[in-house]
Image (spheres, rainbow, N blue to C red):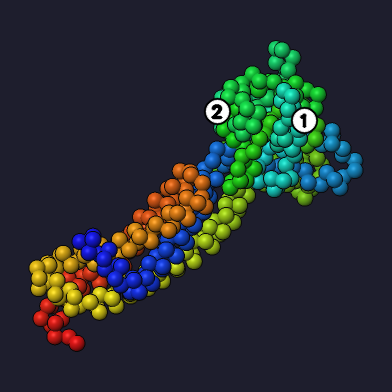
Amino acid sequence: MLKHIFVLFRNQKKSYGGMFVEQILVFVVLLYCFIAVGEAIQRYRAPGMLSTDNVIYFYDYSRDKNSKLNKDDEMEKLESLRKRLESSPSVIAVAKTSQFIPYLRGEEDYRTDSVYVGKGKIEAFMKSADENTMIVFQPMLDEGSWLKEGVLEDGSWPAVINRQFADEAGWTDAIGKKLNHSGYEFTVVGILAGFKHMPMEPSRPTLIIPFCLNSWHFEYSALVKEGERANFRIFLYKEFYKIFEKGKEGLGIVELKKIKDLYLQFDFVLLTGLLIPTGFLLVFAFIGTFGLFWLYSSKRRKEFALRLVVGSTSRGLFRFVILEGILLTLLALIPVCVLFWWVYPFSIVNLSAFGVAVGVMILFSAFSAWLPAFQVAKVNPVEAMREE
């Protein structure tokens, strides 16, 4: 049967050519779409996402307008506010960080600097954090432990890096390695699986040092108990008024989960903009392929009638037409396979997308040919032979 179908394809190139080209086009578009979706899922699931559920970032946004309150005074007041917040039954912990909180700005606006490793240097994102940061943001540690304030026994300061930093430094065992920055010597005590500023962005080399060494910026974030965000806001406003002696307009509050969701919604819209036209293409291509199979099967009623006369069964004709459609699809996969291996690198995501696209195309072909095959199987040989 297979040999006969291939001979049929060769002898009737014009009849099958349109469906062949159409299936190549649909397969290319589907493959591109599935790879884009797969890469987006991979970027989202890549390690480095910080936990932001019930995490609230708060700040004094009127400091620049208040000439009487310098940076040291403001930090002293914020530290007093932190201690009061930690006494609240709504609060689990309050973290002090610098350039650490994700989603507040574009990646290009987070601070980077050169970190010296041996005789070389690595350009890395610079961050500082205290011990509570592990509780509030729950960064994923691959190895080692989190930062602790104070110097280590050898006089160096503890530091945490991410896996991308270790890879760029060429370290297979990074715990205990030394590095230098701004005149300080650091010892790596922990390695994060990654560190991402945005949900869909890759993790890049990052160095995290103790908050007490920070001199460029400061941030405060509170991890609030589930269902206590409203109570926390009320308590925060009340304590802020007492300490800063200014109105409500001086306090900024940001729920980080909402910002993360906004970024994800934007990325979802972009993916939807890709999936919707692909879906329409698949529907219209299905209608076109179905129509061509129907028309071509209708023109071959005498041929199918003769097959029944010489011994074919209705079930055999049904399988014959379905197999025609599937083989046509498999032939269309050949040029797409060549294009795929030439354009896309070898990866699990790309191979998975390719496998899904092949599965969809085979189903697409089988369903396109199913009803015409069903009609063919019901052909009455006598009536078909009488038709002109």
- Quarter that holds the C terminus: bottom left
Left or right: 92 in relation to 1: right
**Mark 2 = which residue?**
142
Residue 79 vertical position relative to residue 23 in the rendered view, above or below: above
> Residue 183's mark?
none
Check disc 1 and report its element: helix, strand or loop: loop
Q: Nearer the viewer, residue 365 or 276?
A: 365
**At x 52% / y 52%, what residue is drawn?**
343
Residue 30 vertical position relative to residue 139 in the rendered view, above or below: below
Camera-nearest label, 1 or 2: 2
Mark 1 surroundings within 10 Å by alpha-carbon count, few (fewer than 14), some (14 through 19), many (20 or more): some
Residue type, label 1: Asn
Q: Could you tell me residue 249's position as x and y percent?
A: 77, 50
> Residue 214's mark?
1
- Quarter that holds the N terminus: bottom left
Mark 2 surroundings within 10 Å by alpha-carbon count, few (fewer than 14), some (14 through 19), many (20 or more): few
Q: Which of 339 and 373 is in front in this view?
A: 339
Q: Nearer the viewer, residue 387 or 254?
A: 387
Q: Could you tell me residue 71's position as x and y percent?
A: 84, 36
Left or right: 174 in relation to 5: right
User: In which quarter of the view is residue 235 placed?
Assistant: top right
**At x 48% / y 57%, what residue is drawn?**
33
Q: Can residue 191 be seen in this view?
A: yes
Check disc 2 and report its element: helix, strand or loop: strand
Residue type, label 2: Asp
**At x 9% / y 71%, what residue is drawn?**
310
How far is the residue under mark 1 from the one under mark 2?
25 Å
Total numbered badges shown on the rendered structure? 2
Q: Could you tell me residue 385's position as x and y percent?
A: 14, 82
